[in-house]
Image: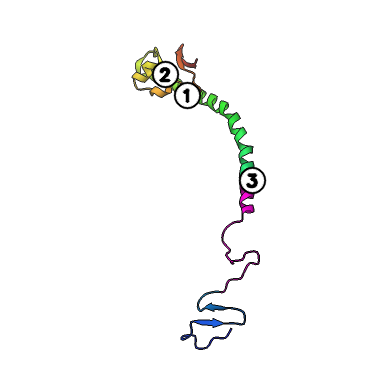
């Protein structure tokens, strides 16, 4: 490249093309007419969407099959919490609670803890919580 008096001239030239001083020459991609390198082609986007769809088709059935197991384990966990609260009630009051509503009324449980996530209602039978 040859430039005469760089401070006076605004343009330098080489044998192929003129460009402003201070800017880097961009290599032209032969596949793109305007020389822009940013962005994705439609084919690349379609491949990405295909991969995402395959991953969803693999994982969603497994999640749906596990939903019943998760709800059943949630009910078992809630029963153990209620049993712990029944024991705490017995220690503090020297008697067994007569109903779940009594535990709620006394502040041992919240109202939403009287039923399991799968819809079964918890009741106290012989001093233990059971789902009905």
Point 58% across, 31% down: residue: 64
Residue farthest to the front, as pictured: 33
Point out which mark residue 78 bears.
Answer: 1
Viewer-proximal residue among 22 and 76: 22
Left or right of 98? Residue 17 is right
Q: Residue 41: say if magenta.
A: yes
Q: Quadrant of residue 65?
A: top right
Point 43% across, 20% down: residue: 114
Please name which of the two marks, 2 or 1, marks the residue nearer to the observer: 1
Q: Say if 57 sits above or below 93 in the image.
A: below
The residue tagged 2 is 86
State how far apart marks 1 and 3 are (Cα).
41 Å
The residue tagged 3 is 50
Left or right of 110? Residue 50 is right
State how far apart marks 2 and 1 are (Cα).
12 Å
Q: Quadrant of residue 50?
A: top right
| Residue 94, image x, y percentages | 36, 14
| Residue 30, image x, y percentages | 65, 67
**Mark nearer the N terminus (2 vs 3):** 3
Give the overall secondary structure of the magenta segment. loop
> What is the magenta range?
25-49
The crowd level at tag 2 (other Cα within 10 Å; few <14, some 14-19, many 20+) is many
Point out which mark residue 1 bears.
Answer: none
Q: Say if 64 sits above or below 91 in the image.
A: below
Q: Which quarter shows the N terminus?
A: bottom right
Viewer-proximal residue among 97 and 41: 41
| Residue 76, image x, y percentages | 51, 23
**Mark nearer the N terminus (2 vs 1):** 1
- Helix or strand or loop: what does disc 2 sit on? helix
């Amino acid at each position: 490249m040859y430039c005469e008096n760089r401070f006076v001239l605004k343009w330098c030239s080489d044998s192929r093309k003129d460009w402003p001083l201070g800017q880097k020459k961009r290599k032209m991609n032969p596949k793109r007419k305007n020389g822009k390198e940013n962005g994705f082609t439609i084919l690349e986007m379609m491949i990405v969407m295909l991969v995402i769809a395959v991953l969803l088709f693999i994982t969603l059935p497994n999640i749906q099959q596990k939903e019943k197991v998760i709800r059943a384990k949630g009910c078992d966990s809630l029963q153990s919490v209620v049993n712990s609260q029944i024991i705490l009630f017995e220690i503090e009051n020297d008697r067994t609670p007569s109903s779940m509503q009594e535990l709620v009324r006394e502040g041992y449980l919240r109202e939403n803890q009287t039923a399991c996530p799968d819809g079964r209602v918890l009741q106290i039978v012989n001093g233990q919580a059971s789902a009905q």
